[in-house]
Image (cartoon, rainbow, N blue to C red):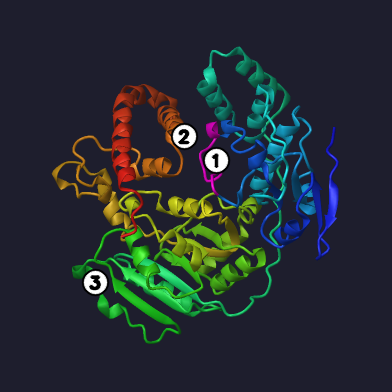
């Protein structure tokens, strides 16, 4: 049975379909923003519904967070939601192969997310007193997994729920027989970008270390921009004995340049020191080893203005070697798969290419320096924005070519994490307990990310996935060796949790 939706015509003539009774004045305002599907399902029983998604992935939008007025959530209530008609038609509405209307709506929200639409929870848009009891059958759950993901994820779900449960195996074989992996979800076309409105000020941040030649190359790209930054802030951690001060001649550049020689350690500290010096309305964060085309900054601004958004990732395109130029970027973009050249919700945050309104960067008080020496600082920054209610969008119009040279950069310090013994240089996350002969794996900062933003239960699920991946990745012939080494890997994971717990006790630090 297909769902019957009503129509609302906005002031611009766009058709919005809806079920239930929304606040139409608010829906009108929302239609001018970046959202495509809107609901108020948290108060109606759908918050963190379908928790089994954790058996496939742990990413930005696995969980619904507390305390937000507006934020991305694909847990749609079928009885109280609104959607742009264009999006509903392109996604062909609910998938009627599910038996449950609740599963149809949740599947639609997830498909919308994957297709490049933005499903949004909006507090108070639908004021319904009805709180649903979510009931999703094992057959519908396994149908979702079979349709969306590789079969490994469904098997892992059975392993976690209980491989002895016949109901799980029956549901799995039912779904496997009836459905197949569907990768034909349509990709929604980006909106046409509006012309730039006004003259917003832009501060461009470059943290760098032992890559002064690359920094100058990037400054030249910035000076060629169709819309130039107001200022560029360089925080350079190159050791004194390796500096080539004569390279930094800034008089010929058409913007203010602030150079600060970094005396602290770590890319998070570097970005924070730069943020303190910024005056722009927007901050663009970029790595030192990228090339950017002439419309790069302009397209970041036009994109955010067109979508009425506050943060976005650009396209980070990997070069084949560090000598390639912007002609190569054009070639790579022309050959890029269509599903990569889309907008919608960014599933991660990329410090190599992003643009954020300064007011929200200031609300975060910068980067968490507990990540210095490890990994995950960009994911932490992005997820912290999400927990403020700021959606990070994917911007395919602002691309960079990431050169990735073999030497230099802040990983010079972080690479010491793999060294053991007397030659090891202490990492910031080691605090007052230096690593001796058991090297923590994964990086303690990765574990810190889970503990900081989620809970022990989600960390436990990550641990299961991590160990299963360790045992079964690569060649099956290596399984016996990996199995023998599994107790050591367990000790290494436990050691990573030990250091992460110490970081949690410290709390977020920005200086």
Question: Position of 475 compared to 249: left or right?
Answer: right
Q: Can residue 324 be seen in the rendering of this structure?
A: no
Q: Nearer the viewer, residue 149 or 124?
A: 124
Q: Residues within 10 Å of mark 3 (few under 14, many from 20)?
A: some
Q: Which residue is mark 3?
A: 243
Q: Are marks 2 and 3 in contact (CB under 8 Å)?
A: no
* Secondary structure beneath label 3: loop
Q: Is residue 82 left or right of residue 158?
A: right
Disc 2 vs disc 3: which is toward the camera?
2
Horizontal relation, residue 367 to residue 395: left or right? left
Quarter of the image for the N terminus: give it: top right
Read off the residue under disc 2.
458
Task: First in sequence, mark 1 or 2: give its number.
Answer: 1
Frontmost of labels 3 and 1 is 1
Where in the figure is residue 189, as x and y percent of width and height?
71, 57
Q: Quadrant of the C terminus?
A: bottom left
Label 2 sits on a secondary structure element that is helix
Specify the quadrant of the image occupied by residue 77.
Answer: top right
Secondary structure predominantly adopted by residues drawn in magenta: loop
- Crowding near the residue tagged with mark 2, few <14, some 14–19, many ≥20 C-alpha atoms within 10 Å: some
Query: Circles 1 and 2: CB distance less than 8 Å?
Result: yes
| Residue positioned 52% across, 43% down in the render | 59
Q: CA distance from mark 2 to mark 3?
A: 44 Å
Mark 1 to mark 2 CA distance (whole Å): 10 Å
């Amino acid at each position: 049975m297909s769902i019957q939706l009503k129509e609302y015509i906005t002031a611009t003539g766009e058709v919005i379909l809806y079920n239930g009774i929304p606040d139409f004045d608010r829906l009108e305002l929302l239609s001018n923003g970046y959202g495509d599907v809107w609901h108020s399902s948290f108060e109606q029983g759908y918050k963190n519904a379908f928790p089994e998604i954790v058996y496939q992935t742990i990413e930005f939008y696995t969980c619904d967070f507390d305390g937000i007025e507006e934020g991305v959530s694909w847990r749609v209530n079928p009885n109280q939601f609104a959607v742009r008609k264009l999006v509903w038609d392109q996604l062909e509405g609910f998938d009627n192969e599910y038996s449950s209307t609740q599963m149809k709506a949740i599947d639609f929200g997830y498909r919308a997310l994957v297709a490049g639409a933005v499903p949004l929870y909006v507090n108070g848009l639908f004021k319904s007193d009805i709180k649903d009891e979510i009931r999703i059958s094992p057959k519908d759950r396994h149908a979702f997994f079979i349709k969306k993901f590789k079969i490994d994820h469904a098997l892992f779900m059975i392993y976690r729920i209980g491989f002895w449960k016949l109901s799980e195996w029956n549901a799995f074989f039912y779904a496997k027989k009836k459905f197949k992996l569907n990768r034909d979800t349509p990709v929604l076309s980006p909106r046409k970008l509006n012309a730039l409105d006004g003259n917003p000020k832009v501060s461009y941040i470059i943290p760098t270390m032992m890559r002064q030649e690359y920094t100058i190359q990037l400054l030249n790209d910035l000076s060629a921009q169709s819309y130039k930054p107001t200022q560029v802030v360089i925080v350079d951690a190159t050791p004194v004995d390796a500096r080539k001060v004569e390279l930094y001649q800034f008089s010929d550049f058409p913007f203010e340049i602030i150079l600060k020689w970094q005396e602290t350690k770590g890319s998070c500290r570097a970005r924070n020191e730069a943020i303190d010096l910024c005056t722009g309305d927007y901050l663009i964060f970029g790595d030192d080893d990228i090339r950017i085309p002439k419309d790069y900054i302009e397209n970041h601004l036009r994109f955010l203005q067109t979508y009425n958004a506050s943060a976005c990732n650009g396209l980070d395109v990997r070069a084949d070697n560090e000598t390639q130029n912007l002609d190569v970027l054009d070639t790579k973009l022309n050959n890029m798969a269509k599903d990569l050249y889309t907008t919608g919700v960014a599933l991660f945050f990329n410090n190599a290419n992003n643009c954020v309104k300064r007011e929200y960067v200031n609300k975060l008080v910068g980067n968490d320096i507990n990540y210095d020496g490890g990994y995950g600082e960009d994911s932490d920054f992005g997820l912290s924005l999400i927990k403020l209610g700021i959606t990070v969008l994917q911007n395919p119009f602002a691309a960079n070519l990431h050169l990735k040279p073999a030497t230099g950069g802040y990983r010079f310090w972080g690479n010491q994490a793999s060294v053991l013994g007397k030659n090891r240089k202490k990492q910031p996350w080691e605090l007052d307990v230096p690593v001796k002969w058991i090297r923590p794996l994964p990086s303690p900062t990765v574990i810190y990310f889970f503990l900081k933003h989620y809970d022990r239960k989600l960390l436990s699920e990550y641990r299961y996935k991590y160990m299963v991946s360790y045992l079964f990745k690569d060649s099956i012939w290596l399984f016996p060796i990996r199995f023998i080494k599994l107790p050591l890997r367990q000790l290494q994971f436990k050691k990573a949790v030990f250091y992460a717990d110490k970081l949690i006790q410290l709390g977020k630090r920005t200086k």
